[in-house]
Amino acid sequence: MNDLAKISYEPPYRQLDQAARQMVDDLIRKIERQSDITGAPLFDILASYQPTEREITFLARGLVRAAIFDRVRDLTDAQNVTPRRIIKELEALAFSSIDHFRKPGASLDYGTGVSELLVAADGGLFELEYATPEQRAAVKEVEIEENARTGKIKTKIKLHDKLAALRMLGQIRGLFNADGDPINPEKWVEGGGIPVDASQETAAEIYMQAFSDDS
């Protein structure tokens, strides 16, 4: 089987382990502080940044570099209202999942709906401070209840309306009309994945397009 078919379309930051995420967060904070002091654009500071030996070890990983680039681009976009920023916010709502807030091995209780999660005894809830910006944007409300008798904690996470976000995103992308009917459905298969016989160059191009499509 071609290994290229295993490429993930999760944002680079979400694919990193906790140590790599912390390194990305720390580096971005340094760049932001330098930008505040000098007034220089974030990308200019990133281009001239001199990493430490520890950072160089992490920067050898392509996903780390991609995560840093995405974060700087998001921060730059945040200074202005751009089409890409609006679409990115809608995508965060439309493609959110309660599974994004679960630690590996933690138990979920879907008895009252997919927006309710029971914290496991080992603290199964994904700490919100470690959530990605996309994950946090999707959260509408968090409720925490503790049973005084048993000490059991129940955490309910409510996400924003996925259906409304999907409809709006579909209209912006030209997939649906105002009535919700599909437009040119025969074209929906385009860009649907990486062919198993794709070359490394083709797979890389498709992969990068998934994160840089501003259309």
Image (cartoon, rainbow, N blue to C red):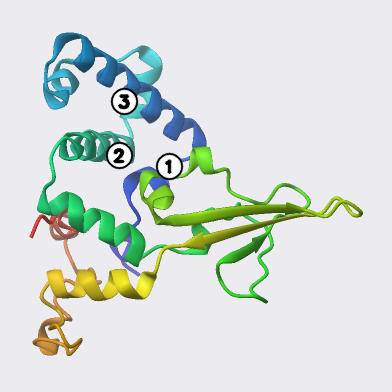
The secondary element bearing badge 3 is classed as helix
Give residue 82's position: percent from left, percent from top.
11, 48
Q: Which residue is mark 3?
A: 28
Disc 1 crowd rating (10 Å Cα; few below 14, some 14-19, many 20+) is: some
| Residue in view at x 15 percent, y 15 percent | 48
How much space separates mark 3 and mark 2, taking CA atoms? 10 Å
Task: Name the amino acid, label 1.
Answer: Leu
The foreground one among 178 and 92 is 178
Q: Which residue is mark 2?
A: 67
Closest to the camera, between mark 1 and mark 3, is 3
Give residue 152's position: percent from left, percent from top.
82, 54
Contact between marks 3 and 2 (CB within 8 A): the answer is no
Contact between marks 2 and 1 (CB within 8 A): the answer is yes
Number of the label disc, if any, that sits on residue 16: 1
| Residue in view at x 18 percent, y 66 percent | 198
The secondary element bearing badge 2 is classed as helix
Disc 3 crowd rating (10 Å Cα; few below 14, some 14-19, many 20+) is: some
Which mark is first along the chain, 2 or 3? 3
Q: Quadrant of the C terminus?
A: bottom left
Left or right: where 54 falls relative to 208: right
The secondary element bearing badge 1 is classed as loop
Of all residues, the one furthest to the right in this rendering is 149
Residue 194 occupies quadrant: bottom left
Which mark is first along the chain, 1 or 2? 1
| Residue in view at x 45 percent, y 55 percent | 139
Q: Quadrant of the N terminus?
A: bottom left
Residue 46 occupies quadrant: top left
Identify whether 180 is placed above or below 198.
Answer: below
